[in-house]
Image: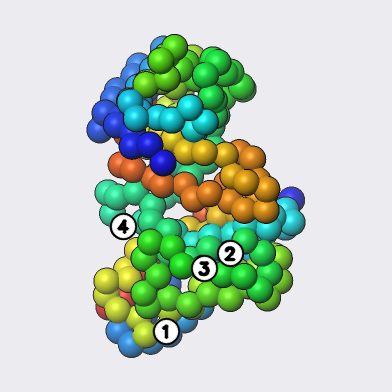
Amino acid sequence: NAGVTQTPKFQVLKTGQSMTLQCAQDMNHEYMSWYRQDPGMGLRLIHYSVGAGITDQGEVPNGYNVSRSTTEDFPLRLLSAAPSQTSVYFCASTKTGGHNEQFFGPGTRLTVL
Amino acid sequence: DAKTTQPTSMDCAEGRAANLPCNHSTISGNEYVYWYRQIHSQGPQYIIHGLKNNETNEMASLIITEDRKSSTLILPHATLRDTAVYYCIVRLPSPSGSARQLTFGSGTQLTVLP
């Protein structure tokens, strides 16, 4: 299994540009989520999904959109990038129910100029 | 989820045991203690979890006090690769068909020294 994969690893955007961060998992996990991590801080939840066709907002959803058309993929879209969105973005997946150990991807480092 | 308190940083000599404490005085009866770690620039990694009994796996041991108000993660023979931020998280297990969030605090920066 490849686990959780994220692309790209690095990205530089100009203010106002849009882009999509890709996330995929091959473990047939129902639950997927996106976090952002700012320097020296913990992870904050952006959006999550408990299954295909179902998404919901996390702690810091503004400026981001998600969709979940398949179990495997959970892309994160930045509609109009702002410098405040400069961060490292992590995607995670887990089975639902119980102790649901979360598996994290390697991260995407985004810089918005 | 119960609030947790961890020291900001700790050092440990390579080959020695690393003991990372976590206070969770407001933990409720059904909440579990989970530990994750994050090696620099990588995604967090699950380590271990427990309810009230001590737990051990191939990575670490988890000691939970009898009153469950605190716990200690033990890395028995720390290596340089164990240098990471360690997060203690307290929460309920997830109901069937859903998944509870992980709330990451600031964690403890463990530095293993050669």
Q: Is residue B15 visible?
A: no
The quadrant holding residue A73 is: bottom right
Q: Nearer the viewer, residue B82 or A64?
A: A64
In the displayed structure, A4 sits above or below A84; it is: above
Secondary element under disc 3, as helix, strand or loop, is strand
Q: Are marks 2 and 4 on the same chain?
A: yes
Q: Which residue is mark 3?
A: A56
Residue marked by disc 2:
A49
Query: How far across and how far down the image is residue B6, in percent?
Result: 30, 30
Alpha carbon distance from label 3 to label 1: 17 Å
* A67 to B29, vertically: above or below: below
* Residue tagged 1: A79
Whichever of callouts 2 and 4 sits on the residue coming sooner in the sequence is 4
**Residue at the image point whose x is 42% and y is 19% from the top:** B68
Closest to the observer, A103 or A62:
A62
Which comes sooner in the sequence, label 1 or label 4? 4
> Mark 3 belongs to which subunit?
A
Q: Is residue A8 above or below residue B71?
A: below
Q: Residue A48 placed where, x, y %? A: 53, 63
User: Can residue A72 be seen in the rendering of this structure?
Assistant: yes
Identify the residue under disc 4: A38
Q: Amino acid at mark 4?
A: Asp
Quadrant housing the C terminus of chain A:
bottom left
